Image: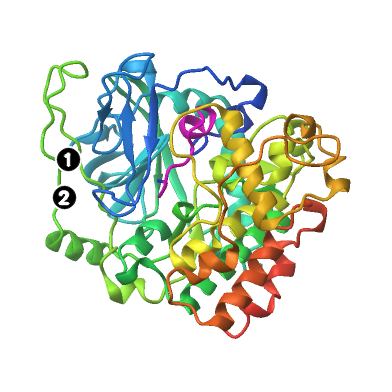
Amino acid sequence: MRRVATGLRRAVPNLSRSGPSHSLLVPRSLFSSTRPSNVFHIMDNKQRIPGIPKFTLSLDEEGKHVFECDEEPHMCWLYNYGYMPLHLGQMIVDTPERKLEIIRKLGFGPSSSTWLARVHRGLYPTRYVAVKVVTTESSELFDTSWSDRSDLWRSIQTADPQHPGHRHCAHWRVYDTFTCDSVHGNHMCLVTNILGPDMATLRSCRNGGTFPVHQAKRIIKETLLALDYLHTACKVIYTDVRPDNVLASLTTADEDIETYLMRHYPEVYPPRIVPELSRKPIITIRSQPLFVDDPHRTEDFSVCLVGYDRVITLKDCPNMQSYEPQSAHLCAPEVYLGHPWSTPIDIWSLGCIASFYLVGHFLPPMPTGVGATYYYDAQYLDWVQQVIGPYPLHFLERCSRRGRYFDDGGHLRSSSSVRHPSIEDILCCSGTLAQNDVEAAARFIRRCLIIDPYGRPTAQELLADEWLQRL
């Protein structure tokens, strides 16, 4: 779930959030400036529910007859997007091994929806579990290397339990997997433990839309601990550092969940009548994460990274340099420009989102619609030039795609007339940070956003930053 307009390249929104391997990543050479994107989603600051994206469906190649879905386009038969239509009370699976009843929608993303289920039968440690239902489009890719993905998840659980970052990764556990069918096709389903709300949803539900400084610093520090564990103990690149992949690690006993459900009933949107999409009224269930409005649980919590669908092993990384592993607005410059990339791309993404925890704003410009890939790339690289730059010539010399964006003198071929605010300006915009916090946070963020990845600090080095001490 994204908070602002993002992931508008066909390769990123449809495949990037779920799936087992690098087969989900699309080489940049496959992007086309004229390729239509008939299903895409837009985030803005005026959501119906805090933190929940809107999808827009274009019914033809010219983008006419646009229909705004309330949430995921589960009714959409166009282009085989493939969200599973579910209803409350439905037994998503009923076999001798397992029987699970859907009782609430917890959220959705570009390639899956997540549901709260009551266990009627199955060897699960709790009476309630979360079920991640992958779209048919992503399930096809998910199934191709399930064995490898399972081995990778197990290694993340067990690589080094003594590492301080282990608990910020291994708290998310996959109990079971199964497949089920819908009108769209076959869906891969993951049964997991239940966590709290993600940081984007939690932030948007708070007064003022921000975390206290000490809590924002703690979220950033624990994310760094998780990244250090993944980089050093697990030997993988996470690739997907976003607030909606950072969840509160809340202890949720069955009794607590039952009490919460008795006070917070599941909700649906008003029916929509759209004959072009469905012969029946379209009924969409609202996303309602658990405990998002419980101050006793959300004032003091640890965080956990989830969704290891896109992790890339350091062993595989050299063979994947032609792939784009990150969301467009959080993408490290080495990925855009064809420079060798590895674990430093995770540090870059963290630098881009740190301000979101502090003041509710991302640093980079956001994609605002579906358009040619080149134009957003150029806009993003111009933002880097203005706010972080200049680009070191020794870095550009190592970039295979520098000629597309830079002239021989290292100057951007296309520079925007838009003047982007500085890091300090962004941090000052809310008026909630003291000047010393602004200065210290800006120094930390600039360390994360060093353009040359060879000079970018590791997660372990950033954990020693003065700004993150005395928490």
x, y (%) of residue 228? 68, 61
- In the rendered view, would you say 199 is above or below 406? below
Residue kind at label 2, given as amino acid type = Pro
Residue at (15% x, 33% y) in the render: 283
Q: Secondary structure at mark 2?
A: loop
Q: Are marks 2 and 1 in contact (CB under 8 Å)?
A: yes
- In the rendered view, would you say 405 is above or below 265? above
Residue kind at label 1, given as amino acid type = Leu
Alpha-carbon span between mark 2 and mark 1: 8 Å
x, y (%) of residue 66? 28, 24
Q: Magenta residues: mostly which secondary structure?
A: loop
- Per the rendered image, the range of residues in magenta is 2-15
Q: Circle 1: is it few (<14), some (14-19), or many (20+) Cα within 10 Å?
A: some
x, y (%) of residue 22? 63, 32
Q: Which residue is mark 2?
A: 266
Residue 414 image-quadrant placement = top right
